[in-house]
C-alpha cells in the first residue's frame, strides 16, 4: 500500500481473519461427529475477526517480528469471541450465513488457514504431493489462504481482477516473508548460542 501511496501508511486498515471454532481435541470419525452429544460435532464451525492491520513504521521495519507479534496478540485477544455462536443460537443458520456473507462483502482482504495432515495422503492410489485451498464465491478483493501439509506451509493468494498488480503484490508478500524469516532465524540463532554457552 505504501509503495503506491505513501499516505496509505497512516490509514486505518482492517483485515478479516476467518477461523474455525470447532473443538478439536483429538481425531474423531464421521460417525462420532454425527452423534448428538459429540464434543466436536460435524459441520462448519467458523467465526471471523476484524483485526486492525498494524501500521508500518520505522520501528516495525527494524524489528519485523514486533509487527507480527502485535497482529498475533490482537487475533488471540479476539479469538474467543462468541458473536457468531450467539447469533446462531438466537437467529438460526440462514441469518448467520447472511451476516457472514455481508461481512465478507464489505471486506477487501480475507485471511484464512487450515491445518492439514502431517503425513502424506493418497487419493485413489495416487500420492498427494501438494495441497492448497482457497475460499471461492466470496466478494472480497484479496484472499490469502494458508495451509500446512506434511509440515510444509503453502500460501494461496487470490485477487480480484484489476484490483491490484498481482506481480507486485506477490513480490511484496515474498519480501515480507523473507524479512520476517531472517528476523526469526536471528532470534533462533541467538538462543542456540546462549544454550551452548
Image: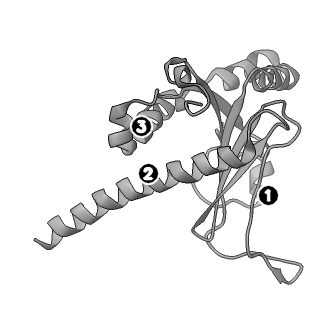
In the rendered structure, find residue 180 and report the number of the disc placed on it.
2
Rendered location of residue 182, percent (x, y): 39, 58
Position of 162 compared to 62: left or right? right
**In the rendered view, does 29 fall on the left or right side of 176?**
right
- At 33% from the left edge and 34% from the top edge, which residue is drawn? 59
Separation of disc 3 and disc 2 at Cα?
9 Å
- Residue sitting nearer the eye, 137 or 30: 137
**Disc 1 residue crowd, few under 14, some 14–19, many 20+, Cα 10 Å:** few
Q: How far is disc 1 from disc 3 in space, using C-alphas?
A: 40 Å
**Left or right: 15 as drawn, with respect to 93:** left
Q: Which of marks 3 and 2 is nearer the N terminus?
A: 3
Q: Quick check: can you spot residue 24?
A: no
Q: Residue 67 bears which disc, if any?
A: 3
Q: Tag 1 or tag 2, which sits nearer the N-term?
A: 1
- Residue at horizontal 67%, vertical 32%? 47
The tag on residue 30 is 1
Amino acid at each position: 500500500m505504501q509503495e503506491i501511496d505513501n499516505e496509505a501508511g497512516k490509514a486505518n486498515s482492517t483485515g478479516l481473519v476467518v477461523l474455525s471454532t470447532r473443538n478439536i481435541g483429538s481425531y474423531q470419525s464421521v460417525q462420532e461427529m454425527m452423534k448428538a452429544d459429540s464434543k466436536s460435532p460435524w459441520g462448519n464451525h467458523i467465526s471471523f475477526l476484524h483485526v486492525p492491520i498494524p501500521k508500518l513504521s520505522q520501528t516495525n521495519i527494524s524489528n519485523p517480528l514486533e509487527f507480527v507479534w502485535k497482529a498475533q496478540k490482537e487475533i488471540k485477544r479476539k479469538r474467543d469471541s462468541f458473536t457468531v455462536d450467539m447469533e446462531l443460537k438466537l437467529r438460526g443458520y440462514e441469518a448467520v450465513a447472511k451476516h457472514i456473507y455481508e461481512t465478507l462483502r464489505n471486506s477487501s482482504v480475507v485471511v484464512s488457514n487450515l491445518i492439514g495432515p502431517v503425513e502424506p495422503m493418497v487419493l485413489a492410489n495416487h500420492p498427494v504431493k501438494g495441497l492448497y485451498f482457497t475460499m471461492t464465491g466470496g466478494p472480497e478483493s484479496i484472499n490469502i489462504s494458508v495451509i500446512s501439509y506434511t509440515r510444509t506451509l503453502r500460501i494461496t493468494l487470490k485477487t480480484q481482477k484489476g484490483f491490484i498488480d498481482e506481480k507486485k503484490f506477490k513480490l511484496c508478500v515474498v519480501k515480507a516473508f523473507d524479512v520476517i524469516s531472517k528476523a526469526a532465524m536471528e532470534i533462533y540463532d541467538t538462543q542456540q548460542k546462549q544454550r551452548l554457552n
